[in-house]
Image (cartoon, coloured by chain):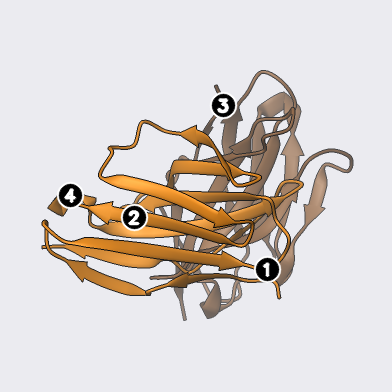
Amino acid sequence: AQSVTQPDIHITVSEGASLELRCNYSYGATPYLFWYVQSPGQGLQLLLKYFSGDTLVQGIKGFEAEFKRSQSSFNLRKPSVHWSDAAEYFCAVGASGGSYIPTFGRGTSLIVHP
Amino acid sequence: DTEVTQTPKHLVMGMTNKKSLKCEQHMGHRAMYWYKQKAKKPPELMFVYSYEKLSINESVPSRFSPECPNSSLLNLHLHALQPEDSALYLCASSRQGKYTFGSGTRLTVV
């Protein structure tokens, strides 16, 4: 079965600083990987996904993530954080072979200081 | 239409009540899902419907009863819930790995 580890419960950055949120996955084959963002009281919005191909994936809102098979990682990055990026970020892994259903990590809460 | 619409947004119910949560999408997605999310936790999968048939039930108690009357609608019927069932209930639909989530129903059981 697949699983996801987000080692950081909270990350605090200053507005304008760069951001990297860590995600490590466990899956026997090539996984499907996702990053979602959730603002308080809201549903989840897909930032980006990786299924195959180019290992550097561009997403919405200026986010990108890089799939590194050797490290079993799919870290999310943004060069300059805006105050509106403060939210909960979930990494998820889906099983390849058709179902795609994501299994979520515990989430990382991003706090942005002015 | 690229949204998943959930109603109601908030629901307070007693432990003896019967209520239903509704989810609707018009994106032609043939897979629909119910998730439960407790505060500060990730969403947990409850049910999966594929082509209007229940394909996955993650050992959810029978006081939660899903229904998929057509390809656009997904209901979750609630009966005799417990206070620990209070949570955000999220609906999602998907096609080819792209998931769209609704904003959820915030359920409080008193």
Looking at marks 2 and 1 on the same chain, the residue that comes earlier in the sequence is marked by: 1
Q: Do the dots labelled 1 and 4 sit on one chain?
A: yes
Q: Nearer the viewer, residue B60 or A106?
A: B60
Residue lying at 62% horizontally and 52% vertically, measured from the top left: A35
Instruction: Establish whether labels 2 and 1 are both on one chain.
Output: yes
Along the horizontal axis of the image, is B5 left or right of B31? left
Q: Quadrant of the C terminus of chain B?
A: bottom left
In space, the residues marked 2 and 4 are separated at their CA atoms by 17 Å
Question: For the residues carrying marks 3 and 1, which lies nearer the camera in this image?
Answer: 1
Per the model, the C-alpha gap separating discs 3 and 1 is: 30 Å
Does residue B56 lie above or below B44 as drawn?
above
Residue A6's x, y, as percent? 49, 41
Q: Is the C-beta separation of discs 1 and 4 under 8 Å?
A: no
- Report which colour depicts chain A: brown
**Mark 4 and mark 3: Cα distance apart in space:** 27 Å
**Amino acid at dot 3:** Gln
State the SS at label 3.
loop
Side (left or right) of B88 relative to B25: left
The chain coloured orange in the image: B
- Disc assigned to residue A2: 3
Question: Mark 2 = which residue?
Answer: B77
SS assignment at label 2: strand
**Residue that extends furthest to the right in the rendered view of this protein:** A53
Q: Nearer the viewer, mark 2 or mark 4?
A: 2
Q: Please give the residue where the numbered disc 1 appears in the rendered image.
A: B26
Above or below residue A17? Residue B80 is above
Comparing A81 with A93, the one in front is A93
Chain for disc number 1: B
**Picture coordinates of residue A103, whole percent (x, y):** 53, 38
Q: CA distance from mark 1 to mark 4?
A: 32 Å
Decide which of tag 2 and tag 4 comes sooner along the chain.
Answer: 2
Residue at label 4?
Answer: B84
